[in-house]
Amino acid sequence: DGGITQSPKYLFRKEGQNVTLSCEQNLNHDAMYWYRQDPGQGLRLIYYSQIVNDFQKGDIAEGYSVSREKKESFPLTVTSAQKNPTAFYLCASQGGSVRNTEAFFGQGTRLTVV
Amino acid sequence: AQSVTQLGSHVSVSEGALVLLRCNYSSSVPPYLFWYVQYPNQGLQLLLKYTTGATLVKGINGFEAEFKKSETSFHLTKPSAHMSDAAEYFCAVSPRGSYKLIFGSGTRLLVRP
């Protein structure tokens, strides 16, 4: 089935460690997004990518990095520079060249610092 | 910068009552507009969207929304709430000519028996 897959579902990180969250889609979508969700703050955009090998910072990019080497994949690395990484992370993709289409979301990764 | 405001972080209604969730956007040029629903520990699912054409948009699960340019609003309604509607609802905008997708802070809908 076509869709967008995030892994792992739960992730624990020690202080000072980098961790990478996976996001893969088989929808042939050009655009992909990473959002962070905290209670009462909605979804805040971390990074987004319109095409392979190109990406832009969102509103809260500090302490995060991404890559877009393949159309299907948009991994997010939470670096040790991110001081408060505990949150629910959502990846999304949006189709083709029609920019008014809806975004499809993965099931999310819950990251906890221990 | 484009922004989205959802009035009311929590809305509580009785089963069978009207649901009204409010969304306003800030933009001189009307963006593309979306409503999404999120159940606990899940991703988001599209309820409906407005791009062009008819300003009253019908979505899934009996929800609809009306785009009002003069009020820069895109409020979500459902005539009769069901217990299964209890979830968090997000309004989102995408500026025309941009891939950026911006969300409001969300409204949690509670449905009382």
Image: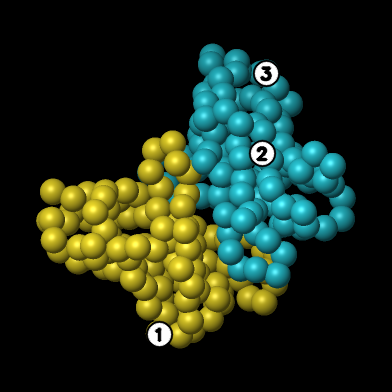
Q: Secondary structure at mark 3?
A: loop
Quadrant of residue A96 in the image?
bottom right
As drawn, the chain in cyan is B
Left or right of residue B59: residue A88: left
Query: Which residue has dot 3 on it?
Result: B17
Whether B25 is drawn above or below B102: the answer is above
Label 1 sits on residue: A69
Task: Look at label 3 and name its amino acid.
Answer: Ala
Q: x and y percent of residue B7 in the render?
A: 61, 31
Is A83 placed above or below A3 here? Answer: above
SS at mark 1 in the image: loop
What amino acid type is highlighted by mark number 1?
Answer: Glu
Q: Residue furthest front?
A: B1
Seen from the viewer's position, the closer of residues A65 and A32 is: A65
**Chain A: drawing colour:** yellow
Q: Can you give x and y, in whole percent of width and height, for residue A10 in the image? A: 25, 53
B42 versus A81 height, above or below: above
Eye-nearest disc, 2 or 1? 2
Q: Could you say which is closer to the camera, residue A62 or residue A35?
A: A62
Q: Which residue is mark 2?
A: B23
Considering depth in this image, is B62 or A69 the residue closer to the camera? A69
Residue for point 18% across, 50% down: A113
The residue type indicated by label 2 comes to Cys
Residue drawn where x is 65% and y is 31% of the image? B21
Marks 3 & 2 on one chain: yes
Across the whole image, how many numbered discs are drawn on residues? 3
CB contact under 8 Å: marks 3 and 2: no
Residue A12 at what x, y percent from top left? Answer: 18, 54
Left or right position of B30 against A19: right
Q: Chain of mark 1?
A: A
